[in-house]
Every structure is written in C-alpha cells, then in structure tokens.
Amino acid sequence: MNDPVDRDLLLQPRPPSPVQEVRDERFARYGVRLVLKRDDLVHPQMPGNKWRKLAPNLRIASARGAAELVTFGGAYSNHLRATAAAGRLLRIPTVGVVRGEELASRPLNASLARCAADGMRLHFVPRSVYRRKAEPAVLARLLAEAGAQGAYVVPEGGSNAAALTGCAELGRELRGTADVVAVACGTGGTLAGLAAGLAAGQRALGVPVLEGGFLAAEIRSLQCAAFGAPLDNWELAEGHAWGGYARVPAELEAFAADFEQRHQVPVERIYVAKLLHALTSLTTAGRFRPGSTVTAVVTGRPDPEPAPAA
Ligand SMILES: *Cc1c(COP(=O)(O)O)cnc(C)c1O
C-alpha cells in the first residue's frame, strides 16, 4: 500500500520555493541585483527542476495505473536519482536504462548506488544503442530486454510536454520579481517551460552546460509540443560550458567554493556553478542594464560524489 503522506508530498502542488537576495560586489558594482531562486529547496526528497519536471509525469503515470516507470541517464544523472527516489516514495518500481555497457561489470558509483538503494533496476546498454533510444524499434527492444513493456516512459532528463507545464509554474512564481531569469540548461526543458510562465517584459536566459549549439532548436520543438508554438522571450548565452558536460576545471571549482563561502549557499557544480560564473562574466561585460534584477534559478543541490575530474 502507498503511504498517503508520501504520495501527497510527491504529487500535490507545493508552496513556492524561496527567493534570496545576495549581496555580491561583482554584481553591485554594475548596478545589478542578484537574486537566487532556491528551487533546490522546493521539495525535501527531490530538489529543483527534477521535481518540477517529474511531478506532472508521475501524476499521469499514476492516473494511468502504470506498473513501472522507465527512464534513461548517464552514470551521474540527477534525473535518474530523482526518478528512483520518486519510485520509492510512490511504491512504483523503476527501471533506469544507463548509458555505458562497461559499467555493468564495475562497482556502482555513489549516484548509481543511490538509485539502486531506492530500488531502481539498472539496465546498462552500449552507447551506440543508448544514442538511438528514441527510435521506436530500439526503445521497444530496450523495454523488452529490461522486462518493462508496460512501463510509463519518461525521456532522458525528464523533458517532455508534461514536464514543461511543471516548469511553467516555476516561471509563474517569479512574476514581478525579476527582469531576467537565468537558468542552466542540459536538455533545455526547464528553460523552455519556465519561459512560458513569465509575465510580459520578463526574459529568460539559458546557459548551456553542453557544447554543440543544438539546444535552441530542441527548446523550440519542446515548446511546440507543450504550448503549440515556440515562445520568443528567451535566449541562450553560449560559451560557458567549460569544455563540456560534467567538466569542472580548477578555476570553476574555486569560483564555486568561494561563492559557497561568501553566501552560504550550496553550489551544485555541473549546472549551477556554470550558471553563476556565466552571470558574473556577463555582468562584467555589461550584458545587464544597471538597475536590473537578475534572478538565478538554483536548480539543484551538490552531487553526493564529485564528477570525474576534467
Ligand atoms: C538536470 C539539471 C539541469 C538541467 O535541466 P534541463 O531541463 O535538462 O535543461 C539544471 N540544473 C540541475 C541542478 C540539474 O540537475
């Protein structure tokens, strides 16, 4: 039987996450107010945008009476961990399809160990197959191999049309409080959804943590799927990926540690550190007009284990 308290905590709307102004001379010097949207505090078990994106999907899966949840991720995926935690709380079995067949024969890292401890069944697949997981035939074969044919499938990173509606709520919580709302982007689902919740005149700014330049098209197509058309109140600031996903060079690590010290805020390294560093650079470069308020979304908490060194 599901514990109704756990279920409600997971599925019911939550109060807005707090906002916190930080006094930082690197912004104040340019007349810019920096505010943190502490979405890392939005949910006790599932921080940040992973809860925003999963909750609407869990409601659908639950309404459909899905027997299992299946999703996809790499060995350090925050989304895999959040899905595993959700499955434990809802008593829905979860299956994680993990990129990298070679990992099957190694001890689990802390992130995957956490997934397993929450009851997630891990199914390791070769990278060549993982890359093609969106193709219907490949997906069907993966589900069959994992013994999860009747499962509700949540895409990699959790970004689908339902997820965008959850992130639009994040945007609505920020109406009237910021000129620019900035967020780090992996799949871009959080940015795509939050832009839809903002008021007229507010703009969203995404900082991609992966290199490649494919993201803008991806965001437009997510917005078409969720809202029927792309929106034009957002843009991306490219050039702040520091060599790619999960790379945390010493200079970025030092910046993040210093930010934590100054402001007593835990700084997740893979996304949030890159966002905050990008905002200091953009402020220095005059990107934000004096007198403006920039709200940075703190989308998650630090990892249980540092990512491998760059
Ligand atoms: C997953 C994640 C993101 C990226 O969100 P997308 O919707 O995939 O762009 C940003 N920040 C944190 C902390 C995350 O875990």
Image: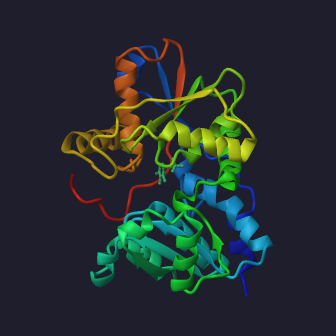
Q: Please state if 193 lies on the left or on the right of 236 as rendered.
A: right
Rendered view: 85 above or below 270 = below
Question: 272 or 216, which lies in front?
Answer: 216
Q: Please state if 2 lies on the left or on the right of 53 as rendered.
A: right
Give the number of marks: 0
| Residue depicted at x 60% and y 71% | 86
Res 122 quadrant in image: bottom left
Whether residue 191 appears in this view of the structure is no
**Residue 181 location (% of width, % of height):** 56, 31
**Residue 28 location (% of width, % of height):** 41, 19
Quarter in which the N terminus is drawn: bottom right
Q: Please, which residue is most extreme toward the top here?
A: 290
**Residue 115 location (% of width, % of height):** 46, 75
| Residue depicted at x 75% and y 41% | 228
Rendered view: 228 above or below 205 = below
Q: Please state if 62 lies on the left or on the right of 41 as rendered.
A: right
Q: Which color mode does the image show?
A: rainbow
**Residue 42 location (% of width, % of height):** 60, 53
| Residue depicted at x 38% and y 45% | 210
Q: Please, which residue is most extreme toward the right here?
A: 63
Rendered view: 3 above or below 32 = below
Res 198 quadrant in image: top right
Q: Please state if 201 lies on the left or on the right of 278 as rendered.
A: right
Whether residue 201 appears in this view of the structure is yes
Q: Please, which residue is most extreme toward the front here?
A: 137
